[in-house]
Image (spheres, rainbow, N blue to C red):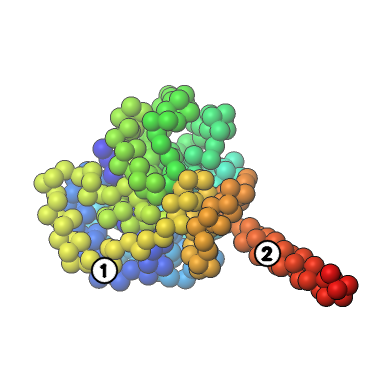
């Protein structure tokens, strides 16, 4: 299995993309020794529109600060098409030996435009380019097939399916993925999976990958990532490397500890963004109330967090209280 370690990038959501550079250097140096790890994803590349923290706004200076200029050609960076710069000159080219892979993730509604940009990026940078399909479980069989047929026409290297909200069960959706994957394989695309562990199925899904003839996947140390985290790097590497991962964890136990949010179990059940779980935790909502709210999230709102579901609930409660208040007021007036 060829692994992309995403601890610093996906785990950045847990640490607000503000990892200490000393730790990032140790992490990079340690994982470079593990043979199965082909790429190490350091973070997002120059996405100032959402956050100004360093691992959401990588540039060459920051990359070299982490790699110490070793030029091992094993660094991956990610961009989110929704927020990234569309100016090609903002991206690294293959005339350097640090960054080898650019991964562009896309929401369903952005896919046609994102694919055009991905192909331009490939032509301009001449680096490995991966197209990551955000929240692939929220696609119907027909939608997935249509997307894969479209992706197969573009000159990019990798296609990754992301279990963004952690609700995937590969055994159950085998038929849904089987034909779309064959379309990609025929076009020569290398296919991988980004597995989350919100519902505790990360490692189970990893074991199913052979059925799909998928030999590439993402993982992170201790599962560091959004929600309940990802497939764990330490679960899938060869035992001879356990001492390397073990030392990294022991030296950085606090940094590599995932804060748990019980609401994420519910968002994974309904296949919606874990930003709803974050909001529920802030409001200290009752579990049953939040579960009812999740049932109502539909369409694009599944992938793109919207506060309207929380506001509506508040409005309904206020409306109910107002109604009860009116009844009491009427009874007082008429002596009922």
Earlier-in-chain disc, 2 versus 1:
1
Q: Is residue 145 left or right of residue 58?
A: right
Please identify the residue farthest to the front as the structure is shown.
336
| Residue at image point 18% right, 55% down | 245
Which residue is at the front of the view, 117 or 199? 199
Which residue is at the front of the view, 136 or 264? 264
Q: Residue beneath label 1, please?
A: 254
Instruction: Count residues near mark 1 (Cα–Cα under 10 Å), then give few for <14, some for 14-19, many for 20+.
Output: few
Q: Is residue 48 visible?
A: no
Q: Position of residue 176 (x, y in %)?
A: 48, 28
Q: Quadrant of the N terminus?
A: top left
Q: Position of residue 76 (x, y in %)?
A: 35, 52
Q: Quadrant of the C terminus?
A: bottom right
Q: Tell me the quarter of the picture where residue 130 sits.
A: top left
Please identify the residue farthest to the bottom as the structure is shown.
333
Q: Is residue 232 visible?
A: yes
| Residue at image point 12% right, 54% down | 243
Q: Residue beneath label 2, please?
A: 317
Q: Position of residue 32 (x, y in %)?
A: 21, 53
Q: Is residue 68 left or right of residue 334?
A: left
Which residue is at the front of the view, 199 or 6? 199
- Which mark's residue is nearer the viewer, 2 or 1? 2
Q: Distance from label 2 to label 1 (Cα)?
A: 40 Å
| Residue at image point 22% right, 50% down | 234
| Residue at image point 63% right, 58% down | 309
């Amino acid at each position: 299995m060829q692994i992309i370690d995403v601890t610093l990038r996906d785990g950045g959501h847990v640490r607000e993309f503000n990892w200490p550079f000393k730790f990032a250097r140790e992490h990079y140096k340690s994982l470079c020794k593990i043979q199965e790890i082909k790429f190490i994803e350091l973070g997002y590349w120059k996405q100032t529109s959402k956050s100004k923290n360093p691992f959401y706004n990588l540039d060459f200076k920051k990359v070299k600060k982490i790699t110490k200029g070793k030029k091992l050609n094993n660094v991956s960076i990610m961009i989110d098409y929704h927020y990234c710069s569309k100016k090609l000159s903002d991206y690294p080219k293959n005339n350097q030996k640090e960054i080898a892979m650019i991964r562009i993730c896309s929401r369903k509604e952005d896919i046609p435009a994102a694919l055009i940009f991905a192909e331009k990026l490939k032509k301009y940078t001449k680096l490995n380019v991966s197209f990551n399909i955000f929240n692939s479980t929220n696609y119907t069989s027909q939608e997935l097939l249509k997307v894969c047929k479209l992706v197969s026409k573009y000159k990019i290297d990798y296609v990754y399916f992301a279990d963004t909200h952690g609700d995937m069960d590969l055994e159950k959706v085998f038929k849904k993925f089987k034909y779309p994957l064959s379309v990609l394989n025929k076009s020569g695309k290398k296919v991988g999976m980004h597995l989350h562990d919100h519902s505790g199925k990360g490692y189970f899904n990893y074991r199913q990958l052979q059925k799909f003839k998928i030999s590439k996947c993402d993982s992170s140390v201790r599962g560091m990532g959004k929600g309940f985290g990802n497939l764990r790097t330490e679960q899938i590497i060869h035992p001879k490397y356990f001492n390397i991962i073990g030392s990294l964890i022991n030296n950085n136990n606090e940094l590599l500890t995932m804060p748990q949010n019980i609401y994420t179990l519910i968002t994974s059940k309904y296949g919606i963004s874990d930003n709803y779980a974050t909001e529920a935790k802030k409001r200290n909502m009752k579990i049953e109330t939040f579960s009812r709210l999740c049932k109502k999230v539909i369409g694009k709102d599944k992938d793109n967090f919207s506060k309207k579901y929380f506001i509506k609930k508040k409005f309904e409660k206020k409306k109910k209280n107002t109604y009860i208040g009116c009844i009491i007021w009427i009874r007082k007036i008429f002596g009922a």
